[in-house]
Amino acid sequence: MAGLSVRRGGSPKARSLVARAVVVGAVGLLAVAGAVMVNSSANAAASTLGAAAAQSGRYFGAAINAGKLSNSTYTTIAAREFNMATPENEMKLDATEPSQNNFTFGSGDTVFNWATGRGMRVRGHTLVWHSQLPGWMQSLSGSTNTLNAMKNHITKVMQHYQGHIYAWDVVNEALNEDGSRRGSVWQNQIGNSYIDQAFQTARAADSSAKLCYNDYNIENWNYAKTQGAYNMVRDMKQRGIPIDCVGFQSHFNPNSPVPSSFQTTLSNFASLGVDVALTELDIEGASATSYGNVTRACLAVPRCVGITVWGVRDIDSWRASANPLLFDGNGNKKPAYQAVLDALNGASPTNPPTTPPTTGPTNPPGSGQLVGRASNRCVDITGFNTANGTPLQLWDCTGGWNQRWSYTNAALVNPQSGKCLNVSGTANGTRVTLSSCTGATAQQWQFRANGNVANVQSGRCLDAVGQGTANGTALQIYDCVAAGQANQQWTLR
Ligand code: XIL
């Protein structure tokens, strides 16, 4: 994955994150306790959007623009408030494949590295769209030729970020307002099957990413385009096309106001067996009431996994004159910000039941290597030693048996040794070892939507010591950082 980097531990920023972990750890602990014990008292109020959303297992994201990352007001707000990032333009087709089979990931990587270096996850946006196409794509002709170009684009872009993207908007805005298919080079040259083929190609390219259909004006249940999208997704699910999620862009203005049926729409799509999310939220004028309402619509639907606003401050918006965002041009919180934060803090403290992709090796539950987000290294049984008490460490992923884990009855079992990922204690800093499986809660782990792997006994999270990323870094349990922190985020794959 040339061009991508991860921030190494030990920097001033990393040290401040360690300090913050102690402060916000209580929130993460409560969230875990709430999920494990089924019900508990309300959470303490969180003070950022990301941390508040994480209390119910959701994320709160923003569109991030590479050109703004040199502005410290912008980056201060973005790093503090959000735990999901969508590159606003940097992963679009004109940015990533300006001439045929010549892929350029510079600005995409800039946003990706900035976000993941701060413990955020990334939504990839977007692989197949009618807009922001390079010239050569606009003039493609012939069904086979166009299909091959589409498949190559999807495959190469997804492989560049393979294993590191939470969800991809595979197809964006494929419908007309009446619910029929929108004309585009893809539709016109390939025909109706292009959407199926895009999703199938995407699953083959990176089975760890959730695959989404994304569109605007599909929020009102009583609207033809919404019905068109619903029928399309239902049909895809029935035919086994690999689609995991639907993104509702949620660009609202007086011509397209927040509909009272939005929660119904989210819930109806979710019952098709997909996650739903608000992916590009902005509301002209930023009414606090409207922002609160859309947030509560998501929170009321268990499979509404998160909300992304389309920019940070009003001056960053693609519709800047509409003042549609949560921060004003000076970076001050607007009344809508407080309405959203209050709504998030009012959510019940349970994780929504998110589903992993329907095919492919990515789990939980399942088996594979347990890969750290910060280090890109694997949880490894030191020295291939199967004795009880052998410490686990980070090491380059080798595919060896000492890096294989199977998630079975909430335990992480190494199939070769038959032994389990274990902690003998509950305190911060307790080291993670290999030990005979007992079925005890000390050996049970909960995979959480923010990437955390929480120990059921202690509620503390699997953590690379000192935010280390090097070979040989020890593993411990430590207070979970509710907003997500890269040395506490793991993928079983
Ligand atoms: C917009 C960006 O915000 C602008 O900077 C760019 O000039 C045009 O695209 N639907 C989408 C987004 O899916 O990608 C669009 O983003 C807004 C509408």
Image (cartoon, helix red, strand yellow):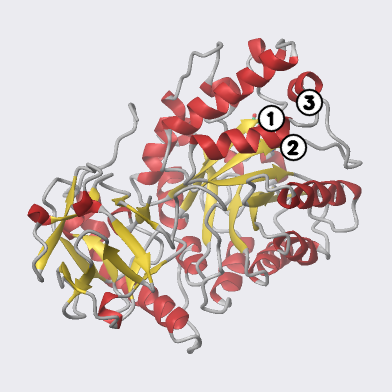
Locate residue 418: give its quadrant: bottom left
Residue pointed to by mark 3: 187
For the residue pair 224 and 363, the one nearer the viewer reads as: 363
Query: Where is residue 162 drawn, in percent x and y?
Result: 42, 37
For the residue pair 291 and 352, the one nearer the viewer reads as: 352
Q: Is residue 265 above or below residue 237?
A: below
Mark 2 beta carbon near ligand 1 (under 8 Å): yes
Label 2 neighbour load within 10 Å: few <14, some 14-19, many 20+: some
Query: Where is residue 160 drawn, in percent x and y?
Result: 42, 30
Q: Residue at x 41, y 43 (%)?
A: 164
For the residue pair 284 and 372, the one nearer the viewer reads as: 372
Secondary structure at badge 2 equals loop
Q: Which mark is residue 173?
A: 2
State if disc 2 and disc 1 touch (CB < 8 Å).
yes
Residue pointed to by mark 1: 129
Question: Could you tell me the amino acid type at mark 2?
Answer: Glu
Q: Is residue 8 above or below residue 5?
A: below
Label 3 neighbour load within 10 Å: few <14, some 14-19, many 20+: some
Which numbered disc flags the more N-terminal residue, 1 or 2?
1
Question: Could you tell me the amino acid type at mark 3?
Answer: Gln
